[in-house]
Amino acid sequence: MKDIIAAQQIQRRSKPSLLSKAQKFRVLPNDSLISDQHVPLRKKKRLLEIIRSVKKPEAGKYPSDFFRPPKNPTGRKNSFGALKTALGMLSRIPKKVFFILLAALFLGCLVLMINFIPEPEPPEDLMVREHSGRTLITDNNNGDEIPLDLTETFAWQSYTVRSGDLVETIARRYGLSIDAIIASNDLRNVRRLRAGEKLRIPNMDGIPYIVKTGDSYSKIASSFNVPLEAILDANDIQDDRIKAGTVLFVPGARMDKNELRRALGELFIWPISGKISSGYGYRNDPFTGTRSFHAALDISANIGTPVKASADGRVSDLGRNSLYGNFLIITHADNYQTMYAHLNRVLVKKGAYVNQGTTIALSGNTGRSTGPHLHFMIYKNTRAINPLEELNKK
């Protein structure tokens, strides 16, 4: 008996038995005590069919050991089963195909990154482009196109004002902006043009500029959003030297918004429509009867009439007191301030920026008042000035 058992063990070491193959491919459990002698012929055939149906993975087929299907000899449920299944599917891709796909993915990402880099954009308020061999500067604020012939040198010509002429009609006649006419002649009030007056007319659109200490050509070009070449060519500049006090002509440039409004008599607009019940200057106080100085305009208006901002600015103060009732103060450019008093209601908050013509309050009869009206004041450098000097200049 011992010889038979020893012979069987030698046979099993030399050649894998059907039983060991079945256990290897998990057909039978490892702790099975069944030997080949105890397996009927029918079961042997069935085990052989099962063993043959199990395919072994081919060696060297995987790109790396990382992508091999994960083994789970314990048979426990794995929470990363979906991920392992995906990696197992990926592992069946041949090496050549895998590396080709990886290279294609890298090149695709590189192309996308190159195409995503944006091209440099022109300045926000100005766009320079070529059209029919001429450079055009387009002002994005109003859409005006200003042709600049960079081969032309700036020059003046004279014009004699005729009866009925307006700045707008003169500018249109020469194909210029009103800024060019106003700035070239330093007009403080366009409504004061007189027949026979001589005006300087530039041969290209733009405005003159007086060079200041510390200026450079590139700095001037940047401040006006105009190409440097346009300034150099228009003024026939051959070198980089620049001298304070020199008058340069800046093609395509525009006046400061507030300066233009001042020249047009529109720096301040009437905050409300109505009759002036009390003007700027000395008067008899309606409460005491004594002579006193009234540093404002009183404009009659019904309670609840909309009050508009006389100019662009920021709300610097608002509140209520016994003298002015509900009041509002707006601070503007160039050290200007406006005050609106005896209001029924304020519609803006302190610190808010308002544009000229924006409704900021409703007129009323609050505070020390003899009737519904708007108390309107204009300050320059903290000193009250006559509002009529800034409103509707004629």
Image: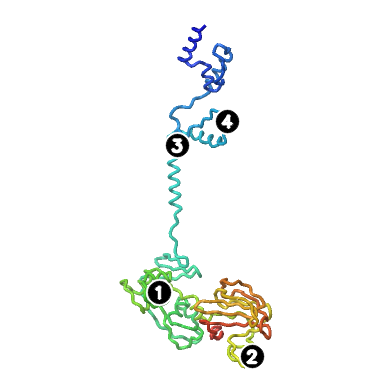
Judging from the image, what secondary structure is the residue with disc 1 in?
strand
Observer able to see residue 29: yes
Distance of label 4 from label 2 (alpha carbons):
100 Å
Distance of label 4 from label 3 (alpha carbons):
31 Å
Judging from the image, what secondary structure is the residue with disc 3 in?
helix
Q: How many marks?
A: 4
Distance of label 1 from label 2 (alpha carbons):
53 Å
Left or right: residue 137 versus residue 314 is left
Distance of label 4 from label 1 (alpha carbons):
83 Å
Q: Does label 1 or label 3 sit earlier along the sequence?
A: 3
* Residue type, mark 1 in image: Val
Q: Does label 1 or label 2 sit earlier along the sequence?
A: 1
Residue 178 point in image, percent of width and height? 47, 78
* Residue type, mark 4 in image: Arg
Residue 151 point in image, percent of width and height? 35, 71
The image quadrant that residue 247 belongs to is bottom left
Q: Are marks 2 and 3 in contact (CB under 8 Å)?
A: no
Q: Does label 4 or label 3 sit earlier along the sequence?
A: 4
Residue farthest to the front?
A: 2
* Residue type, mark 3 in image: Phe
Q: Which residue is mark 1?
A: 250
Binning the other alpha carbons within 10 Å of mark 3 as few (below 14), some (14 to 19) or many (20 upward) gives: some
Distance of label 1 from label 3 (alpha carbons):
63 Å
Q: Which residue is mark 2?
A: 285
Q: Which residue is mark 3?
A: 98
Q: Nearer the viewer, mark 4 or mark 3?
A: 4
Judging from the image, what secondary structure is the residue with disc 4 in?
loop
Distance of label 2 from label 3 (alpha carbons):
96 Å
Q: Which residue is mark 4?
A: 76
